[in-house]
Amino acid sequence: MQSLICKQCNSTLRWDGVSEVVRCDYCGTMYRMHPRRAADPDRGVRVGSGGVSPIETSRGAYAGYALFKSFIPDGWSVETNAPETESNLLAPLTAQVRYAAPDGNAAILFTGMRAYAHLELTPQTAQQQGQLVRPDYLIGLAYRDAATVCGGVIQGPPGLADAQLVSEDRTPDAWAQRQIEQTVQEYARAGVLNPGGCWARKVFRGTDGGRPILKQVEALITYAFLPVPPQEMQLWQMLQQSRMRTMSALGTMRGGIGLLGGLMNAANMARSGTMQPPQPKLRWTVHYVLETAAAEPAFRQAQADSEKIRESFESLPLMQREAERRRQDFLMRSRQENEVISNAMGQMARDRMASWDRRQAIMQDASNYGTQVMREMQANTARTNDIVNNLRSESIRGVNTYYAQPFGASSDPRVVEADVRWDHVYQNTQHPEWFAAHEGDAPLEFGVDYEELKNTGGRY
């Protein structure tokens, strides 16, 4: 039994910690309480018991909540942070969980899925790998196979001192092979080209702080090529035709008419090269990187524990809802971009019907149109970010928002919040400050004086 103070009469309130409503025994004032559920499914643990358990997030927007679950060795501590900052909507959601043995002789680091768009290395991009964001909101990074990823983990910070390769295996075990096959089947159903995957496991011997240890790094990667969109191919063909007309005109002006003009035209074309047609785009995904480090006597057991972790690791509903919101945001942006491309292609097709004398004017119009489109896309992106942030805030606080009638004479729209357990929320048309709610799929009929409110979907 907990003791609280009544704000009206300063007498003691008696609350059992479970009831949602408490009444003051002296003045009768009612208080709505918010008890913490003893078995909250979004809560996790920080110390393992030798089984599969939800993992409590240590810091960030989801501190105290469980986004993932996995096997945790008995007595081992586990720590994970929020996958990313609240405002960074472009980066993929990536889990990173650290497991540590109580005696300090073993540790495991699990880094979850991260998606990339292949970016060819050039002198301009060599120093910017992993920082460039592609138009489809994936991080631009040159493709690396699983063995290269494993080697990069050892070489990167903090790394091992005097690391020596002990063993290497590129043939996936049965569990890893099933993951690759399932992903390849999903890719094939999605209509992508040449899907595939690779797996690698490397074991190194070295020192960490002067102490000899063994470190195993394991990675699983899948990849596929996205077909060239028809609009992009049409745009390339139109640009190629325009370029050919320009080079032909330059050849005539520089070389004159006849055989000499033809030779000059051919020389100009050879000097300028040809425009390469668009190619299918490579997308690749690191499904996980699993690092296991331990003193040699404890290494075998740590290896066995790491296999249990990778096979049991799973995102919980809270993480799944967040990932789904990000996916919907990505789809919304993609639809906007496809619509912009379609409109631009239609405009360019109509421009092709114009006379050659109007070419410069048409190019200027297309430039202005592109500027306008980019401004519209930026405005749409800002609105989308507001919606995603509102929904994330509602998810954390466990509420839904609804459009409501104004409480006073003001005509400004109002938004009210209600606990997520209510499936239907109503407002009294005569007394806008009165509300009603109930659980269940079928709406109730409260009479003409009550009107059901519409969920805002984050648009406020």
Image: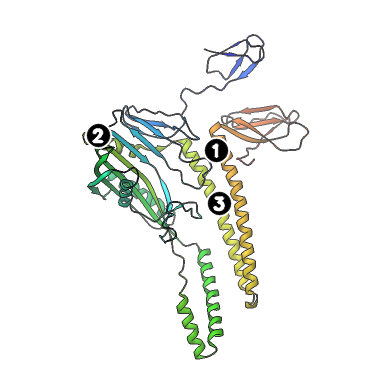
Q: Amino acid at mark 1?
A: Arg
Q: Which residue is found at the position 55% from the left and 89% from the top?
A: 257
Do labels 3 and 2 touch, CB within 8 Å? no
Within-10-Å neighbours for mark 2: few <14, some 14–19, many 20+ = few
Q: Secondary structure at mark 2?
A: helix
Q: Camera-side residue: 226 or 152?
A: 152
* Circles 3 and 1 in contact, beta carbons < 8 Å: no
Q: Is residue 350 visible?
A: no
Distance Cα–Cα, label 3 vs label 1: 18 Å
Q: Is residue 349 above or below residue 399?
A: below
Whole-angstrom CA distance, mark 3 to mark 2, is: 47 Å
Confirm whether residue 332 shows in the render.
Answer: yes
Element marked by disc 1: helix
Which of the 4 image quadrants contains residue 351?
bottom right
**Nearer-N-terminus badge (3/1):** 3
Comparing 126 with 26, the one in front is: 126
Image: 274 above or below 331: below
Q: Position of residue 289 (x, y in %)?
A: 35, 44
Residue type highlighted by circle 3: Arg
Which residue, given by chain and number where applicable, does mark 3 sit on? Answer: 333
Q: Is residue 328 left or right of residue 358?
A: left
Residue holding disc 1: 392
- What is the C-alpha distance between the residues marked 1 and 2? 40 Å
Q: Give the image quarter of residue 7.
A: top right
Image location (x, y in percent) of residue 77? 35, 29
